[in-house]
Image (cartoon, rainbow, N blue to C red):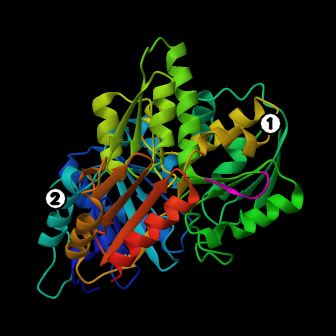
């Protein structure tokens, strides 16, 4: 195939594009060879999701890695956090073939170093892209140079059982009461992992869309979009479930719905899991555990952490920043507004499944309904993320700054975009890295103040 621009394919944290228009097996083979060469890896682990193009792309990557001398462990169908488990437990660099929640025509690669450490633009991905670019001829055809090295081996390994056992070793589920749980896998990898992870627990499982189908015949596997939660919400109400769980396409994110069918915000889940992880760390003798949260999570999260005598640390949005800060501060847990949850005991990697087990343990360990259990974490009114298409991101951001950043008792910071805060409100305005968008998040003490701020900022942004 003809490759036009690898910079469109290689994003900040992963490789992602349309198959076969933007990439195919020949390019996957080149990425496998380049990955091994840049990391100096003698062995790697490779897995893939249920997309129609994933098996052939992952096999081509494996062949490229083996051609450059690496022994390749293929784990086949897996969730992204199952690949992280394999990377961590085997102490090998890893490659996961998935496009997460993107539509069916997309595919991609999430790469990590040994121990599930992230590979992004600043940690090897740029060098991998540059090496692959050097193998493109003037017509855009990729030819991987032959190297004088013994070809590595290809072997297969089953990791789902070990993944499930490891997750369940990190949460005490022995005393939970029977629960009815509706789970929407969205035809993604949750249909592969949930039956094994939940096996033997006192759960009446109501499965939805567990058939692995990378064409996503029922709805997009992106629970962050409210329209993709509608089926789960209806099912929870229909069957009288205690809660609902929705996983994205590669099942590394988990969204929660309460017994009324109402979504539980990822910030509330972050606060709930943080409370449990703080208690667990204290039992192990850690006096003041650290919890990471990005700057778009609710003020509730750092408030709860401080109330428990632990240490909240605020970071930029994005898994590379969370994982870096977790490593530097030895944090026990980190959460994002997008339902990515990171655990020190899971190689600082994100796993929605472990967060789901914490929710089950918390709910099943006491008699209240989930809505009552999470009520104490609902302290503010939030807008959710609102995108606006703008011609000049910087100019519109400065207009918002001029209007809001000079008031009495107002603070401003630029950790990630523009954050302006008052005594009982805040908003963040961030530019997209890949599209002409500004992303707005607003939170305030009550709904009326939140709506007033939201509408005022949007009027300026969209003027």
Question: How would you rate the neighbour count of disc 1 (Cα within 10 Å): few for under 14, some for 14-19, many for 20 or more?
Answer: few
Which residues are drawn in magenta? 259-264
> Which secondary structure is most common in the magenta stretch?
loop
Q: Is residue 362 above or below residue 133?
A: above
Residue under the point 31% across and 33% down: 327
Which residue in the protein does label 1 denote? Answer: 368
The reply, left or right, for residue 39 in relation to residue 112 is left
Percent from the top left, x then y, of residue 185? 66, 61
Of circles 2 and 1, the one toward us is 1
Comparing 114 with 99, the one in front is 99
Kindly report the distance in space between the C-alpha atoms of the residues bearing marks 2 and 1.
52 Å
Comparing 184 with 365, the one in front is 365
Percent from the top left, x then y, of residue 14? 33, 61
374 falls in the magenta region: no
State the residue lying farthest toward the front: 408
Which residue in the protein does label 2 denote? Answer: 127
Percent from the top left, x then y, of residue 409? 31, 46
The reply, left or right, for residue 433 in relation to residue 283 is left
Q: Secondary structure at mark 1?
A: loop
């Amino acid at each position: 195939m003809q490759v036009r621009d690898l910079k469109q394919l290689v994003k900040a944290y992963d490789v992602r594009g349309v198959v076969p228009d933007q990439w195919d097996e020949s390019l996957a083979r080149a990425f496998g060879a380049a990955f091994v060469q840049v990391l100096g890896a003698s062995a790697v682990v490779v897995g893939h999701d249920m997309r129609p193009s994933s098996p052939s792309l992952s096999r081509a990557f494996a062949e490229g890695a083996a051609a450059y001398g690496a022994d390749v462990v293929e784990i086949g169908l897996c969730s992204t956090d199952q690949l992280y488990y394999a990377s961590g437990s085997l102490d090998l660099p890893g490659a996961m073939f998935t496009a997460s929640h993107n539509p069916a025509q997309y595919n991609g690669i999430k790469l990590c170093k040994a121990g599930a450490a992230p590979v992004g633009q600043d940690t090897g991905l740029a060098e991998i892209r540059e090496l692959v670019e050097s193998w493109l001829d003037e017509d855009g055809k990729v030819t991987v140079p032959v190297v004088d090295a013994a070809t590595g081996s290809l072997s297969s390994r089953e990791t789902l059982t070990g993944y499930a056992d490891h997750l369940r070793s990190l949460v005490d589920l022995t005393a939970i009461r029977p629960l009815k749980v509706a789970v929407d896998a969205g035809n993604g990898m949750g249909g592969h992992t949930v039956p094994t992870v939940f096996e033997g627990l006192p759960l009446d499982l109501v499965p939805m869309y567990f058939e692995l189908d990378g064409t996503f015949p029922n709805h997009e596997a992106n629970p962050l979009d409210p329209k993709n939660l509608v089926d789960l919400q209806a099912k929870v109400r229909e069957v009288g479930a205690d809660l609902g769980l929705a996983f994205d396409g590669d099942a590394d994110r988990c969204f929660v719905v309460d017994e009324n069918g109402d979504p539980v915000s990822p910030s509330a889940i972050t606060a709930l899991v943080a409370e449990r992880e703080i208690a667990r760390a204290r039992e192990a003798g850690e006096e003041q555990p650290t919890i990471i949260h990005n700057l778009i999570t609710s003020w509730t999260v750092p408030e709860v952490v401080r109330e428990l005598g632990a240490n909240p640390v605020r970071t930029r949005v994005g898994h590379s920043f969370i994982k870096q800060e977790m490593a530097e501060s030895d944090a026990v847990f980190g959460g994002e507004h997008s339902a990515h949850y990171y655990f020190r005991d899971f190689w600082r990697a994100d796993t929605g499944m472990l967060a789901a087990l914490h929710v089950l343990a918390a709910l099943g360990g006491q008699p209240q309904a989930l809505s009552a259990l999470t009520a104490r974490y609902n302290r503010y009114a939030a807008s959710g993320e609102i995108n606006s298409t703008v011609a000049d991101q910087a100019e519109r951001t400065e207009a918002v700054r001029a209007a809001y950043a000079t008031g009495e008792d107002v603070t401003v910071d630029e950790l990630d975009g523009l954050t302006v805060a008052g005594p009982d409100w805040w908003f963040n305005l961030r530019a997209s890295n890949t599209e002409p968008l500004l992303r707005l998040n607003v939170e305030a003490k009550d709904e009326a103040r939140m709506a007033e701020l939201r509408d005022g900022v949007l009027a300026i942004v969209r003027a």
